[in-house]
Image: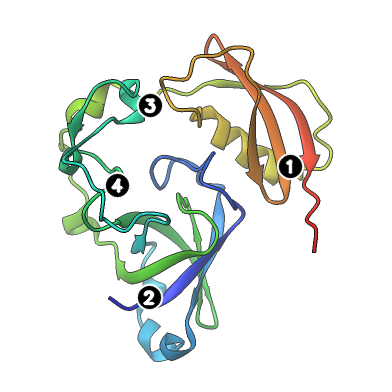
Amino acid sequence: MKIIAEIQTDMKEKFGLPRQSGLVPGLRGRIVFRPEFKSPEALRGLEGFSHIWVIWRFDGFNGDKWSPTVRPPRLGGNKRMGVFATRSPNRPNPIGMSVLRLDGIDGTDLLVSGIDMRDGTAVYDIKPYLKISDCIPDASDGFTSDTNGRLYDVAFECDVSPLSPDDKKTVIELLEQDPRPAYKNEPDRIYGMNYKGYEIRFKTADGKVTVIEVKEIKFHE
C-alpha cells in the first residue's frame, strides 16, 4: 500500500481527538499529496462532491499484537467486544476510514473538516462519498446505540482571549464529546489537550467540563 498524502491538522496528539469523523465540524485540516501523486488530473471532478472517504493509517500500530477482543472506551473500558465489531486502532491491519467534508481544493491540496486524525497522519486513498449508496438512514448502531449523542456542558473559568471565536467554538465542540476514556471518573484530575499550539487544561465532573487554563505551548528548537 502506498502512502499518497498526509493530513495537516491543529491536533498534534491523539488525546482530545473526536472518536469519529464529523462529530466536530469546526476541526479543519488540509490533505497534502506527496510529490508523485500531486496531480490536478487525479482530482478532476472531485470539486462536485461535498464529502469524501479518507482511508488512513493508525499511528503506533502495525497489527503484530492485535487481539480478537478489545475494550471499547465508551463501554467503560471493562467490557470486551470483538475487534471487528469496533473501530479500535489495534487490529490486524491498522487502517482507519473517515467521512470528511470537502470544503475546497487549493491547487492539489484538499481542504477538509470534521477531522478525527492527528497532524501528520498518513493517507492511503481518497474516494467520493455517494449518498445514494453510502447513506443508510435505518442502519442499526449495535451496542453503541446507548452511548451515542451524549454531550457535556462546557464552561470556562479562565481567560480565553488567546483563542479566536472560531477556535473557542471548536474547543467547545471537542470537549463536549468528553475526550477522557469512559472508565476515567476522577473529578479532581486535571487533563491537558493540545489544540493549535495551546494546552487546554480542564477537569470533568457531573456531566460538565470546566476549562481552567488556556496556555500557549512553547516549542524548543
* Residue drawn at 57 percent across, 31 percent down: 175
- Specify whether 117 is left or right of 74: right
Q: Are marks 4 and 1 in contact (CB under 8 Å)?
A: no
Q: Residue 99's image quarter?
A: bottom left
Q: Which mark, by number, is residue 3?
A: 2
CA distance separating discs 4 and 3? 25 Å
Q: CA distance from mark 2 to mark 3?
A: 34 Å
Residue at (41% x, 40% y) in the render: 19
Q: Position of residue 168 (x, y in %)?
A: 69, 38
Numbered-mark total: 4
Q: Nearer the viewer, residue 162 or 79?
A: 79
Measure how far apart labels 1 and 3 are at the Cα level. 24 Å
Kindly state the secondary structure of the residue where label 4 is placed: loop
Q: Is residue 137 visible?
A: no
Q: Can you identify the residue that label 1 sits on?
A: 165
Q: Which element carries disc 3, helix, strand or loop?
A: loop
Q: Which mark is residue 149?
A: 3
For the N terminus, the quadrant is bottom left
Which class describes the residues within 10 Å of circle 3: few (<14), some (14-19), or many (20+)? few
Q: Nearer the viewer, residue 78 or 140?
A: 78
Q: How is the image coloured?
A: rainbow
Mark 4: few/some/many CA within 10 Å (<14, 14-19, 20+): many
Q: Is residue 212 visible?
A: yes
| Labels 4 and 2: the sequence-earlier one | 2
In x, y percent, where is residue 210?
A: 67, 20
Q: Is residue 42 above or below residue 18?
A: below
Choose the circle earlier in sequence order: 2 or 3.
Answer: 2
Label 4–label 3 contact, CB within 8 A: no
Point out which mark residue 90 bears.
4
4 vs 3, front mark? 4
User: Looking at the image, is mark 4 or mark 1 earlier in the sequence?
Assistant: 4
- What amino acid is found at the position of numbered circle 3 in the picture? Gly
